[in-house]
Amino acid sequence: MTHPCVVTLDRKSAPRVLFAGNRLIEVDLPAGTRVIYPKPPLEGLRDPDAAIRYAINHPYNREPLYALLRPGMKVVIAMDDISLPLPPMKRPDVRERVLTIVLQLLADHGVDDFEIIIATSVHRKMTGPEVRHIVGDKIFDAYWPKRLYNHDAEDRDNMAFVGETDLGERVVLNKKAVEADLVIYVNLNLVPMDGGHKSVAVGLCGYESLKAHHNPKVMRKCHSYMDPKTSELNTIVERMGKVTNKVLKVFTIETTVNNRMFDRALSFLHKNEDDWTGNERLAFKGVQFALDRTPAEARQKIFEKVPSPFELTGVFAGETEAAHAHTLKRCFEQYCVPVEGQADILVCGIPYVSPYNINAFLNPLLVQVMAQGYLFNMYRNQPLVKKGGTMIITHPCTDRFDHAQHAPYVEFVHRLLPETRDAMELHKRFEAEFAQHPAYLQMYRRGNAYHPVHAFFMWYWGEAGRQHVGRVIVVGADNAYIPQVLGYETARSMHEALEMAKDGAPASPQITCMHLPPIVMADMVMPRSHGAAT
Amino acid sequence: MAASYFDVDGTLVRTNLVHPTLFYLLNQATPARTLARLGGALLRAPRLALAELRDRRAFNEELYMLFRGMSEDRLHALADEAVDKVLRPAIYPGARDLIRRCKDLGHEVVICSGALDFLMVPLARELGADQVIANRLEFHDRVASGRMIPPVVAGPTKALLIREHARRGGHDLDASFAYSDSYSDVPMLSVVGHPSAVNPDAALERLAHAHRWPVVHLDRTP
C-alpha cells in the first residue's frame, strides 16, 4: 500500500508549489507524477527541560553527567554551529535549553573552569548576534567572547594531535578539548548525517583531519550521506571518532527536532496542494504576490527574519555511539517515507537556504550542493532517481555571492570550474593552493568567511549525485553562464524541461517530485520484478 | 616562484607616515630644536593637508621636507627606537600570521611602502619580510635635504617598482599576491594575480567587492 505522503497526480490535480530560491512557483506536472510530501511533524516534547534533565541523568552506556563532575576539573562544552537547524529556530534554541541546564549542573558541582566552543570546523565563524540567538542573552552576556567562542581550525598553536587510525587517518583537534578532563558535546541533530562521532571528531578538527574523508574518492562511495551504514564518509568519521574517544572523555547530548519548519502563515507548504483549504490557497497567492513584487535582496531578508518553530522531539545522552543510535531512529521516524521504485526523472525545488548560507545568498556553488548533494542524497537503500536519470531543479542560479562569507567560492566557480568540473582533478590540482591561500585564511580566521577548502568540499558534496545522475536541467535560471559552468542544461519552463528529460528516457518515464522543504527522505523499496539498480 | 607585496601603513600597522615623523620631530637633540621643528611642522600643516587631497606622492614630498637639516647619523640612530616605540606596538594582530603564511608558501615577502627605508628595514626584520622597497631621503654631506631620491614610492610608481622587482627576482606576477588598505594602491594591487584589500578604505572596499577581491581585516583578533 502506498504511504499517505506519496501522492500520484491525475489530470485534475492542482499545480504543485515549489521553491525556486526565495520565490514560490507553481508548476504543472503530468498525470501519473508521483509527489513525495514530508511526514507531518512529530509531536514536540511537552516539557523539554525535564526531558533534557532526564536524559543527562539517565544516559546510555555512561555514568550520569553529575557523576563525572568534580571540583577543579577542566571542562569543555562544545556545540553545533549555525548550520543547524535550517532555518535557525525560534528562541529559545535547543542549545540554550541544554546549556542552561548543563551550566547549572557544573555550578552545583563546583566546576568553574569551563569554556564553551562553537564547533565550526572549517565553517564560518558565527557573529555575536548569531551566537546570542542560539545560546540566549544570559549565557551570551556572561561568557562571550572569552569563555564562549568559535573554534579556529587555523590556530596552529591551539590544535593538538590526538592519534591515528589503523589506516593512517590523523586526528588533530582543538587543544582545549584535548586537554580538558571532560568534553560535553551539545548537538542539534537535524538530519541523519549529523551528530555521532561527527560532532567532536569533525566539529573540532581542522583541514588535516578533514581531508581524510572530505575528498572526492570518499564521496563517491557514499550511498547515501543520509544513511550512515552505507556512507564511507561516516565510516571514516567513526574510525576517527573512536580514536578521539579513546583519548578524550566525551559526554554526548544529542537532540532531535521535528520538521515544523514553517509557522502557521506558511504551514500550507507542508500539505498536498489538492487538500488546501480556500484560506490556504488565498494565503499562498498572497505570499506569492508579495514575493514576486519584492526585490530579490529584500525577499532573502524576509525569509532570514522568519525563524522556524521547530519543537524538540528527543534528547539522548551518554556515550557517543549509544546515544546516537537513538537519535538516528528518531530522525528516520520523522523523515523517512517509503517509496517503491526509482524514478527516471526527479523534480526538486531548490529553496533559499542551505546549511552554508545562513544570513547570506544561496550562491551557485550552494545551488549545486543542494541539488546533487543534499536533495539527491535524501534517500535510504537506493537513490530516488535511477542511474543515468534526470534531475530537474527550479532556481534562478544567479551569479551572486556573499563577499564576507563566500569569497573563496567566487574564485572556485569563476576560475576553476571553467577549467574543469572533474572533482578528482580539482582536488589534485587546486585544493592545496586554496588550503594555504593567505588572504582567504585570514578572512576565515578574522572575519566570517568559510575556510577556502570549503568551496572544494562543496563541490565534492555533489560528487555522488554527479556520478549517478545523467543530466541536471534547471528551470528558471536568470542566466546561461552559471548553469553551463555547473554542467547543467537550462529550460524556460517545467514543460520544456520534462520534454528534454523524456529524450533518452523510457517511453513512459516515471516522474517523481520531491516536495520539500520541510525535509523528507525516501526509503526506497525496489519492486520485486526489478533487479537492483545502483 | 611567487612573491607577496605588502603596503605597510594601514595595512600591516595602524600608524601612518606622520607618526614616525612626529617621533623624530619630538626627539631632537635639544628641547629648543624640538620646539623649532614642531613649529615648522605646524606652519607646514595646511600645505600637507592640501597635498593629501591632491595625491599621495605630493603628500610624501611635503612631509619629508620636515626632515630637512637632520643628520643621517641621527636618523639612523633613532630608527630602531622609532620602530620599537611607534611601529611595533601598532602592528595589527593578524600581520605576523599573514606574513608567516606567505612564507610557508615559499613566497619572497616584500615590503613596498612610501615610508622611509631606514624605518622599513628594521620593521621588515621585525615582521619577517625579506625585502624592502621604500622611499630614500637625499643627503648632502650626510644631512637630509628633505627631498626624496627618485623614484618616489607612491601610487602608480609602486606598480612599476613591483614589476621591476619581479623581473629581477624571477617572480611570476600572475602567481604573486599584493596587500594594501588604500585606494591609492590600486595600481600595485592590479599588477599581481592575487590582490587583497586589507582593512580597506571605503573606496577600495567598493572596488574590492566589484572585482571580488578578498577583503581581509588584520585589525581583528580571531
Image (tube, rainbow, N blue to C red):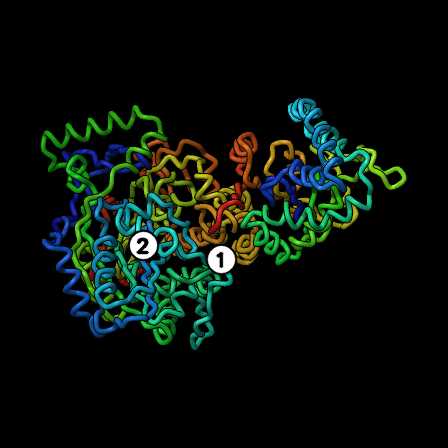
In the image, A340 versus B156, the foreground residue is B156
Report if the CB atoms under discs 2 and 1 are less than 8 Å apart.
no
Q: Quadrant of residue A149?
A: bottom left
Q: Quadrant of the N terminus of chain A?
A: bottom left
Three-letter amino acid code at disc 2? Asn
Specify few, some or many for label 1: CA neighbours under 10 Å numbering under 14, 14-19, or 20 or more: many
The dot on residue A275 is none
Q: In what quadrant of the picture does the C terminus of chain A appear?
A: bottom left
User: Where is residue A363 shown, x and y percent of the image?
Assistant: 41, 40
Q: Chain of mark 1?
A: A
- The crowding category of the residue bearing disc 2, from other C-alpha atoms within 10 Å (few below 14, some 14 to 19, many at least 20), is many
B208 lies above or below A67: above
Side of A54 relative to A144 (left or right): left
- Residue B129 at least partly seen: yes
Residue A371, image x, y percentages: 35, 47
Q: Which residue is mark 1?
A: A154
Three-letter code for the amino acid on which mark 1 is drawn: Glu
For the residues carrying marks 2 and 1, which lies nearer the camera in this image?
1
Residue found at the far right of this picture: B141
* x, y percent for residue A300: 33, 34
- Which element carries disc 2, helix, strand or loop? loop
Residue at x 39%, y 45% (from the top left corner): A366
- State the mark number for residue A377: 2
The chain under label 2 reads A
Does residue B114 appear anywhere in the picture? no
